[in-house]
Image (cartoon, rainbow, N blue to C red):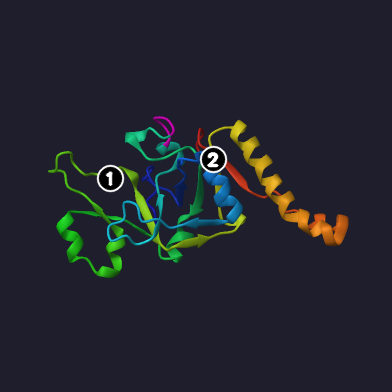
Amino acid sequence: MLQPNRVDLDGHLIHFTKPTEDHSALEVLLKIVHEKRLLGGTGFVKGKEHCVSFTEAPLDILMRPGCGSHHGARYSCFGLRFRKNQICKLGGMPVKHQSEGDYFAMDPEHRWRHVRFELDRNPPSDWRWELEWRLRCKEFSFEHKQVEIILPSAAEERIFRTAISTYSYYRAWPHTQILEDNGLMYLEADRWRVLSASVNN
């Protein structure tokens, strides 16, 4: 149980998206929401196990210095927030910050949790501020009721809502070829819950 005086922690985990060469962070988020799944990656995971990464830092604290700039974070202002117990039940765990030598002493089944922590290096290796959790998997599927969408402003929310309605329309459209107007019953209601990264949630 979380201690009530730990203002730096809460009962949620956040997965932030980041831009790629071809897509913005918002476009990456829309693809994730459209597919209702997160794909595990091997970047920064020693041993190249596939993992989905999260932070347990509360949204308001994480974003205080400005979106994507906290200690040089690899974050955007776009992401998905899940209940911590949901990820824990699937096998998600906090990473372990330790020396490179400690990695080889770990149980091989848990080496995917290793993050290098060495203050005597030049430059030092210290990623504790990320409060990172990992879920070892190649793919993590979810439903709309299990997640909250993080967007930086009302403008991005309007873009998000419009895109979601477009996805829904194009999923329903092929059914109209057979069922005519009845095919529109396949339109999905917009039930995604949205949080603002600029306020305390």
In-image side of 100 versus 5 (left or right): left
> Which residues lie in the magenta part?
63-67
In-image side of 122 versus 139 (left or right): left
Q: Residues within 10 Å of mark 2 (few under 14, many from 20)?
A: many
Q: Residues within 10 Å of mark 1 (few under 14, many from 20)?
A: some
Front residue of 151 and 198: 151
Front residue of 93 and 20: 20
Name the residue at 21% across, 44% down: 125
| The image quarter in which residue 107 lies | bottom left
Name the residue that disc number 1 marks.
127
Query: Outermost residue, left direction?
Result: 120
Front residue of 20 and 65: 20
- Position of residue 161 relative to residue 54, above or below, is above
- Is residue 168 on the magenta stretch? no
Secondary element under disc 2, as helix, strand or loop, is: helix
- Residue 193 visible in image: yes
Name the residue that disc number 2 marks.
26
- Position of residue 37 relative to residue 129, above or below, is below
Name the residue at 39% across, 53% down: 2
- What percent of the width, then of the height, locates residue 63? 43, 35
Most common secondary structure along the magenta stretch: loop
- Is residue 65 on the magenta stretch? yes
- Position of residue 175 relative to residue 15, above or below, is below
